[in-house]
Image: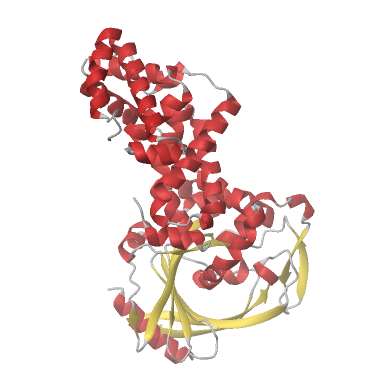
Amino acid sequence: MEMSELEYEIKKSLCHKVDKIEPSEENFAQILVGIGNSPGRKTFKIGNERYLAAFLCALLIISATFMLSDNTRAFAKETLSAIKTVFMIDKNNNVIEKPTTYSFLQPALNKNTQSSDSDLSKQMGVKISFPQEFYGDFKLEQKAEAVGFTRNIDYETFTNLQATALQAFDSNDVFKSLDKYQPYRSVGAIYSNKQGARISAVVYNRKIPITVENMNITDRVPTKVGNQDVEWISLSYPVYPDNDITKKPTTVASTSFLFWSIGETTYQIWPMDNKSLSMAETVKFAESYMAAQK
Amino acid sequence: MKDTELIIRCQKGDLNSFSELYQAYKKRAFGTAYLISNQKGIADDIVQEAFIQCYKTIKNLKNPETFDVWFYKVLVRTGWRLVKKHNRFILMEELYETEDLNSTTNISITKLDVYDALEKLSLPLKTVVILHYFNDLTIEEISNVLGCFKGTVKSRLHNARKQLFKALDGDAQQAERSLVYERKEYGFDGNV
């Protein structure tokens, strides 16, 4: 054997040895856990604004959306046994306490994304288009993706599902393994204009029921986006400190949004500040958005 | 593989960017960790610890352009520490799991022999071989990763190849003759 042949064999053998072995899918979740428990956890505060903005990436945010950064660390190591109750509101908007085993959550995990529309379309199985600018001077602020569940589950169950749900972002096999919780993927974008109006457009790859126990629907107005029947839904929901449902809500807020499903795909258009866009204006925004999806 | 903007965003604590960084480096990092440890479980631990360390200390990296060397330094140090901690020996079962034992081709035999021979090297020699042949790092980059002189890296690489050659060919004299040529190639006179 010549030396050059040896070098070739070394290189080939090393590559061959690792070729069929993949890193554990849990690795990144474990890394996040390690980061979250570090003394340096305050560094998350820097990036947290981004996640806060991504908060709107799911309808059920109102019920309970757990942001990736905060909750990975919160769920991963905090002693669950120390948390006995969670808070919700009743039909009269009164804050009530429930045990952590009470199933009322349809939670979602959000994270900001820089994936292209085509990549998001592939992942979702639905054509996704978030134009950089449309409907006058509304400009794209950021995009986010989420993995959530439409089946009501309790806080403890979701706590235990956290790591798996994180993996489901990148793995369809893991996503499918969560089937009994009726998982969905969603992608959303936040748009804003010079007047300060902010509005989000969210697409879900599943038909999403609009009955969630932790929010009170106060009004459902049928209307149309183009020829499509949609609803303008108004509801109230609890606002938790740090988005932590184990803390008593500071207030009960209200909001409205357009919501409709076409086949198995669900759309939501949500004026984020409640005031700047009326239903009629939101409908026009939605029509402009849907035109961009064709 | 470098993405300076990505590194800078990571230095600002952006978790999305860190996730991108992980995706970009995970395969090569895992491969390196696996070759150092020869066990998947330990390799996963090495990768996890290295990325946690990376996230915690990346803000101290003055020049984002040098991320590769800096990261491999973290990875290798973590790898050595965990390998020593676990004090594992080669598990031949793992090799057989990835090999077709019915194959009688020379290539398969060579691969198995290379694995075997590589595992017999000391950790410093094995690491130099991995960084050079798997990670495609230059002598200078390896010296920065390991924090030693370039001459030391050259020497380790020379010795590693000599041992591998001997193990595979069984002819020490042939190995030495071949390495005389190779020694010039790798600049033992001081030039890489």
Q: Is residue B45 visible?
A: yes
Asked where in the image residue A227 lies, by quadrant, the reply is bottom left
Percent across and percent down for residue B62 are 47, 57
Residue drawn at x 64%, y 50% is A76
Q: Nearer the viewer, residue B31 or A65?
A: B31
Question: Which of the 4 image quadrants contains residue B176?
Answer: top left
Nearest the camera: B192 or B16?
B192
| A282 sits to left or right of A293 | right
Work out whether residue B45 or residue B74 is closer to the camera in this orientation and state it: B74
Q: Position of residue B101 (x, y in %)?
A: 33, 14
Q: Residue furthest front?
A: B189
Q: What scheme was used to colour the molecule?
A: secondary structure
Q: Residue at x 66, y 62 (%)?
A: A104
Quadrant location, the C terminus of chain B: top left
Is A222 above or below relative to A57? Answer: below
- Percent across and percent down for residue A30 are 57, 46
Q: Is residue B5 above or below residue A241?
A: above
* Badge count: 0
Q: Residue placed at 33% from the left, 17% from the top?
A: B162
For residue A236, side relative to residue A209 (left or right): right
Q: Where's residue A54, x and y in %?
A: 51, 70
Looking at the image, residue A136 lies above or below residue A118: below
Q: Does any portion of residue A185 appear in the rendered image?
A: no
Q: Please tell me which residue lies in front, A190 or A172.
A: A190
Q: Image check: A45 left or right of A257? A: right
Q: Is residue A50 above or below residue A221?
A: above
